[in-house]
Amino acid sequence: MSKHVYISADYSENDGDRDVVDELHKWGKDNYHAVDYCDTAQVVSGSVSDDPDCRPCDLKAEFNRQINKSSAVLFIIGDKTKTRTAGSICRRNAEGEFCVCTPYKQNANGSITCKIYGKTVTPGANEDVGKINTYSYIEHEFRQAVKKGKTIIIVYNSLYKQSSWLPSYMSGYENEAHPFWKHDATGKVVGDYTYIKSALGY
């Protein structure tokens, strides 16, 4: 049975965790297991962000949709993850409908008025995490995965457990989080394929 797995990671060019994502996608193309990985970068580069008026709230709504159709959500934690704040600047709930924000990747054009009109509502227990919030993108993804009861897999971009890297909103998952890398029989650093297969239920 094919599994749709959503990957959440830090995609910063110079000090993010793309190496883990690349390894996962490589495994996703093997002949042994049908795993369809969808990562944050793929969502961000897709049709939603093609709209010149794409806002952080639009991206968060799309993250929700992708997480909802996934059977598992895999979070990659690096040494910079807990300090990343991308997606957290939203003034809508604090300042009302005439606040301003900056469309995604349009910093050079400055801020414009919020595109959400009228009253905002608090989502119900069975609804998605609201797209209007001050969570970073990764915190939003984590809260959505928890709220929707998805299988959550957390790996460190490290050879060792790095509990101090976990953001505060992942408190309680220290025992579940696992190093992504390991040494093989020859001493070479490789991804822990066996662990990922097991975590996905294979």
Image: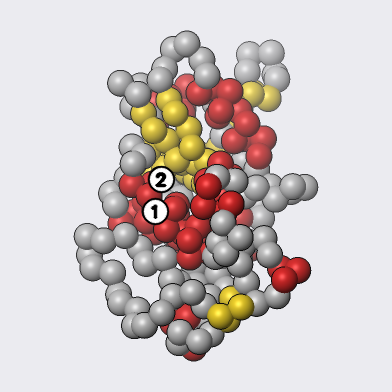
Question: Would you call the spot at circle 2 few (<14 residues within 10 Å), some (14-19), or many (20 or more)?
Answer: some
Amino acid residing under circle 2:
Gln
Q: Are marks 1 and 2 in contact (CB under 8 Å)?
A: yes
The kind of secondary structure element at disc 1 is helix
- Residue 106 is situated, as x and y percent measured from the top left of the image, at 68, 65
Q: Say which amino acid is labelled 1.
A: Asn
Q: What residue did someone put label 1 on?
A: 64
Q: Give whichever of 140, 131 is nearer the camera.
A: 131
Query: Residue at left 34%, top 54%?
Result: 146
Figure check: 24 above or below 14: above
Determine crowd level at label 1: few under 14, some 14-19, many 20+ residues with C-alpha closer than 10 A: many
163 versus 39 height, above or below: below
Name the quarter where the C terminus is drawn: top left
In this orientation, does residue 162 appear?
no
Residue drawn at x 62%, y 40% is: 157
Image location of residue 132, percent across then percent down: 43, 71
Query: Looking at this rendering, what residue extends furthest in the top direction?
Result: 31
**Where is the N terminus found, in terms of image quarters?**
top left
Going 42% across and 17% down the picture, which residue do you hit?
33
Q: Which residue is drawn at 35% across and 79% down?
A: 120
| Between 167 and 120, the one nearer to me in the picture | 120
Left or right: residue 57 versus residue 199 is right
Left or right: 146, with 137 as reference point: left
Q: Name the residue under label 2.
A: 66
Residue 87 vertical position relative to residue 101 in the rendered view, above or below: above
Relative to the observer, which residue lies in front, 168 or 88? 88
Report whether residue 6 is seen.
yes
